[in-house]
Image (cartoon, rainbow, N blue to C red):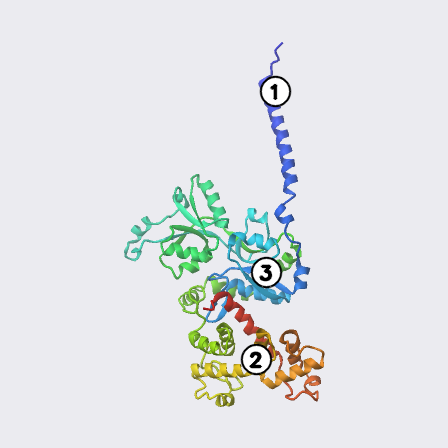
Amino acid sequence: MKTKFKPYLLVLITLAVISCQQHNASQSKNIDSDYNPIVANSVDRDLDDIKKDGTLRALVVYSSTSYFLYKGQAMGFEYELLNKLADHLNLELELVISNDLDSEFEVLNRGDVDLIAHGMTITNQRKWEVGFTEHLYLTKQVLVQRKPDNYQNMSWATLQKHLVHDAIELIDDTVSIRKNSAYSERILSLSNEIGGDIVVDTLDSKLTTPEIIDMVAEGKIKYTIADENLAKINASVRPILNIGVPVSLSQRIAWVTRTKSVKFREVINNWIKNEKKKTEFKVIYNKYFKNKRSFNRRTKSDYYSLKNNQISKYDEHIKTHAEKIGLDWRLLASQVYQESKFDPNAQSWAGAKGLMQVMPTTAESLGIKDISDPIESLRGGTDYLWQMYQYFDHIEDSNNRIKFALASYNCGYGHVLDAQRLAEHNGLNPNIWTGHVDQMIKALSLPKNYNKPFIKHGYVRGSEPVRYVEQIFERYNHYNQFISLE
């Protein structure tokens, strides 16, 4: 006996089977999606742990907009905002330089840093691994292409024939981008949208977007993709670039935290929302992404760290004098910046003058004939610093010893001696600067301390030498990041 199935019944049975399979698959997917091994295995570290450590550890990149050195000063959109955030959270800021953009999420999730602080596009794929903050700004991705060498002599119509005007023209052509970047994700989506293959040339993950844009300008690669605000500011000094073809809609750019760091992210989100309402936020954004004149001036300067290994025009003289006293020249350069910002005509309210801000009476004892002469000032100032350094020859640690010398340079050896006496009186170590003598020199601004019988030199505004030493060493750390010792 043969059994016959009516066609509609067969269809219903088939649909039922498919529906059952899809339901089971959906249940399986939901069960699987509840467990994310990347998030599950990430370090359990949130706001309370960060506060306990007292340090905001942020991963940053060297770039023309994010973090760089210009005329001896650390600058950048992310750098300025991070300083404001650290102040808001009452934390010390520790910058960690990213040298591999592909490994940043791994570095974050294992707890080496607590924040990735450079502009990253929010995508669903990335949200599976990490938690994004409130967005900092909106932008879109554009195609970066090079005009012909003689484009200035071409008619407008001829020039247009050499350029891509629509993303669809990229079918079967090659675009160079970093692997695992948001640009890489966008190219895959774009290929699907236009129904054709775009060949991807994968670039080194150590390259920043501005560096890749430069490669297009120099003819090393044909095309790349970049966020429009980055493309615009970089193209302002590279007129041979065309950035007029959009390849995405508006996208949100944000910083990145661990998914588990819920409280930390909430605090940052509230801070960003409030900051974006302020005029100062817009000023900082415009400084790095819209002020073409300033960007042009920086990138063409000899004292721009992304292009040259120089801090100031006095580097060679600073190196000579630093070598005489066995000091890292970058530390001496940081002191010179602290004193005068490399301005030989600088003068303080107290009458100190020149690169090293030497007082006239001190200049005379050091044999400085012309206090405004930068070379004389450097020579005399370095000699004076060396004198201060020699006073503390009983301190073995050179890093600790130079802090005492710098403080003495700033406020006078006698006041530092008083602070050492007060430290000993209060059970602190008179031969350790940080956490011991620095606290006592600040205490010497109070009558109950500077009036003690063993204090010889009286009142001192102690917060100034403490801040002086801290800022010199903070800047020195930036110089170490950007400038090789040679």
Q: Secondary structure at mark 1?
A: helix
Give the Cα distance between marks 2 and 3: 40 Å
Give the quadrant of the C terminus. bottom left
Task: Mark 3: give few (<14), some (14-19) or many (20+) Cα within 10 Å.
Answer: some
Between the residue at mark 1 and the residue at mark 2, the CA separation in whole angstroms equals 94 Å
Q: Residue at x 59, y 23 (%)?
A: 11
Relative horizontal placement of residue 473, taking residue 213 as reference (left or right): right
- Quadrant of residue 267 in the image? bottom right
Which residue is labeled 2 in the image? 405
Evaluate if marks 1 and 2 touch, with contact meaning CB atoms under 8 Å apart: no
Relative height, residue 459 to residue 60 (above, below): below
**Residue designated by label 1:** 9
How would you rate the neighbour count of disc 1 (Cα within 10 Å): few for under 14, some for 14-19, many for 20 or more?
Answer: few
Residue 259 showing in the rendered view: yes
Q: Nearer the viewer, residue 208 or 270?
A: 208
Residue type beneath disc 3:
Ile
Looking at marks 1 and 3 on the same chain, the residue that comes earlier in the sequence is marked by: 1
Q: Secondary structure at mark 3?
A: helix
Residue 310 pos. (x, y %): 44, 69
Helix or strand or loop: what does disc 2 sit on?
A: helix
Quarter that holds the N terminus: top right
Vertical relation: 106 (above or below) 426: above
Q: Amino acid at mark 2?
A: Ala
- Which residue is under mark 3? 272
The location of residue 8, given as percent across then percent down, is 59, 20
Of tags 1 and 2, the one toward the viewer is 2
The kind of residue tagged 1 is Leu
User: In the picture shown, does residue 193 fall above or below 450?
Assistant: above
Q: Residue at x 64, y 33 (%)?
A: 24
